[in-house]
Amino acid sequence: MSEPILNHVRHLAMSLSPEEQLKLIADLASQLQIPSQPIPRKKARTTRGALADLGPAPSAEEIDEARREAWAGVPGNES
């Protein structure tokens, strides 16, 4: 549809009462033929893939060292 015709139709529709505008919208909506297409789904990422940008996991020795450092200043910890 050309722009001048669309503007003319829009102008005519704006001259209708609110009730007539709603009826027009309902009539037009019922005539729409929208092809139903499945919504494309995003591929699910695995947990491993989601965390891949964080780099390699710390080793058991690195975890133990971090624990020792964290608990070093806590009173009652003689380790």
Image (cartoon, rainbow, N blue to C red):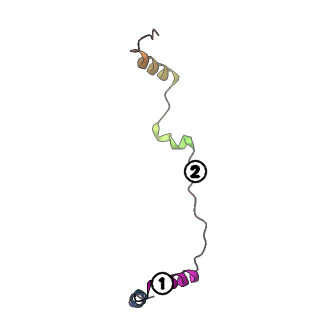
Where are the magenta residues, as a range? 16-41
Kindly identify which residue carries mark 2. 44
What's the mark number on residue 41? none
Q: At which x and y percent is residue 2? A: 42, 89
Front disc: 2 or 1: 1
Q: At which x and y percent is residue 37? A: 60, 69
What's the mark number on residue 19? 1
Q: At which x and y percent is residue 9? A: 43, 89
Residue 20 located within the stretch drawn in magenta:
yes
Q: Assess disc 1: are there few (<14), some (14-19) or many (≥20) residues with their C-alpha within 10 Å of its C-alpha.
A: few
The part of the image, by quadrant, that contains residue 66 is top left
Callouts 2 and 1 close, C-beta under 8 Å: no
- The earlier-in-sequence mark between 2 and 1 is 1
- Left or right relative to 32: residue 12: left
Assign the N terminus to one quadrant of the image. bottom left
Instruction: Please tell me whether mark 1 sits on a helix, a strand or a loop.
Output: helix
Type of amino acid at the residue the image marks with label 1: Glu
- Left or right relative to 3: residue 29: right
